[in-house]
Image: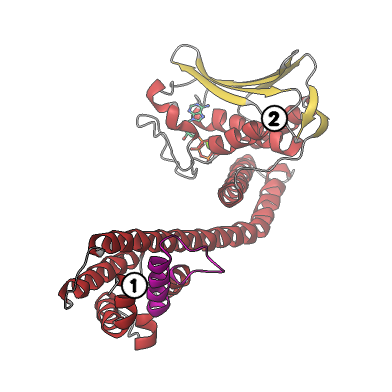
Amino acid sequence: MRLSAFILDNLEPILQEWEDFARSIQPPHRSMDVAELRDHAKEMLEEIAAELDAGQAQPATGERASEIHAVTRLQSGFNIDQLVSEYRALRASVLRLWAQREKTASWFEVEDMSRFNDVLDRALAESVACYSATVRRSEDIFLGVVGHDLRTPLQYLSMGAEFLMRSEKSDPQLIQLGSRMFDSAARMGQILDNLLDFTRSRTGGGIQINPRPADLAGISEQVADEFRFSHPDRTIATEVIGDVAGRWDVPRIGQVYQNLIGNALQHGAKDSGVTVRTSGGADGVEIAVHNHGKAIPESAFAGLFDPLHRYANASTEEADRTHLGLGLYIVREIVHAHGGSVAVRSTAGDGTTFLVRLPNKPAA
Ligand SMILES: Nc1ncnc2c1ncn2[C@@H]1O[C@H](COP(=O)(O)OP(=O)(O)OP(=O)(O)O)[C@@H](O)[C@H]1O
Ligand SMILES: [Mg+2]
């Protein structure tokens, strides 16, 4: 008897072992019934048998049992290790029962077993991929909702802070408090923007841009002004040289300035200024944002643009943990979407410069 027929003939004992195993690993607070414990195992075994019979991978028509199983296990509170362990147990029980059967001539035994392993690995990989994608989607939705819902209260905070800052009746301490609050609210807004872009780019394959004919001179000044307002004690010098017109997604380029200037203010020396130079030439536009302060070690350059990676500058007084380490990742995504590149130069003597190069005519 071929292994596929053996599986179909022995569905019940295999399913019983599957059920016993699932019961042994079910989440402690749950008491799952037989249907829930066996969830889609029968369909999965039938699919595996059909695939073994066909001798090749069967194209999926709709969702596979392994995928539906992954989602139901997630809903039942199984973690990914438990999901994987179910497949391990299934493999062991099928192969054990198969080995214990009354043997007949079995030239195909090895071939069937190795095919079975392949098919089971395929089902396992599908389950894991589907499990992770579902988790990721729900995380993204969660983050999206949190980000969206935090925006309105944040706007009120920021309006209140601005009122304190600008009120003629306020004493200097209140004005200073207002300015700090305004700064914090602006930073929270920026963190939310980055977080939403990050989740979107993760699911949608990069950040989408919408380039139109535009000039970058205005946008660098506008972003710098926002920072001058929230950081009245810091100097931000802007300079625009040459022709900086081209096809750009201006709000997105604005985000590049925002992240780079924000970084320079946050991570650079607090007692020195920031310079932002935007220069246009025949090949395109270069944006250079410079600050003084402790250098970023060269060993940290590679990971600097990785999402959620935060090069921790241990000796700085960065007790402030309100940043996520997404800013440079988003800068890089936006710049790449425009067909450009981003680089960093950092030495103790010259400080840190982030250099963005944008070609004049970005790819469509
Ligand atoms: N201008 C700079 N000078 C010195 N270090 C910098 C500068 N810009 C970035 N860094 C270092 O690179 C790290 C990554 O920067 P990135 O903007 O990606 O994250 P972040 O600023 O920590 O958080 P956020 O997600 O809020 O931007 C920073 O944590 C900091 O250590
Ligand atoms: Mg940053």
Question: In the shown orientation, is residue 29 left or right of residue 341?
Answer: left
Locate residue 224, reporting x and y percent: 69, 30
Q: Nearer the viewer, residue 167 or 287?
A: 287
Locate residue 345, reporting x and y percent: 50, 18
Question: In the shown orientation, is residue 152 left or right of residue 349?
Answer: right
Q: Is residue 285 visible?
A: yes
Asked if residue 22 is among those painted magenta in the image, a careful observer would answer no
Q: Nearer the viewer, residue 75 or 9?
A: 9
Disc number at residue 224?
Answer: 2
The residue segment tinted magenta is 40-66
The structure residue drawn at horizontal position 64% and vertical position 31%, both measured from the top left corner, is 335
Neighbor class of circle 1 (other Cα within 10 Å; few <14, some 14-19, many 20+) is many
Does 139 appear above or below 71? above
Amino acid type of the residue that numbered disc 2 sits on in the rendered structure: Ala
Locate residue 89, reporting x and y percent: 25, 69
Does 88 appear above or below 335? below
Tell me which numbered mark, 2 or 1, is placed earlier along the sequence: 1
SS category of the residue bearing label 2? helix
Q: Nearer the viewer, residue 109 or 73?
A: 109
The structure residue drawn at horizontal position 66% and vertical position 35%, both measured from the top left corner, is 337
Tell me where residue 167 sits by quadrant.
top right
Query: Mark 2 or mark 1, which is nearer to you?
Result: 1
> Label 1: which residue?
4
Q: Is residue 26 visible?
A: no
SS category of the residue bearing label 1? helix
Question: Ligand 2, what quadrant?
Answer: top right
Residue placed farthest to the right in the image? 213
The structure residue drawn at horizontal position 25% and vertical position 79%, both measured from the top left corner, is 17
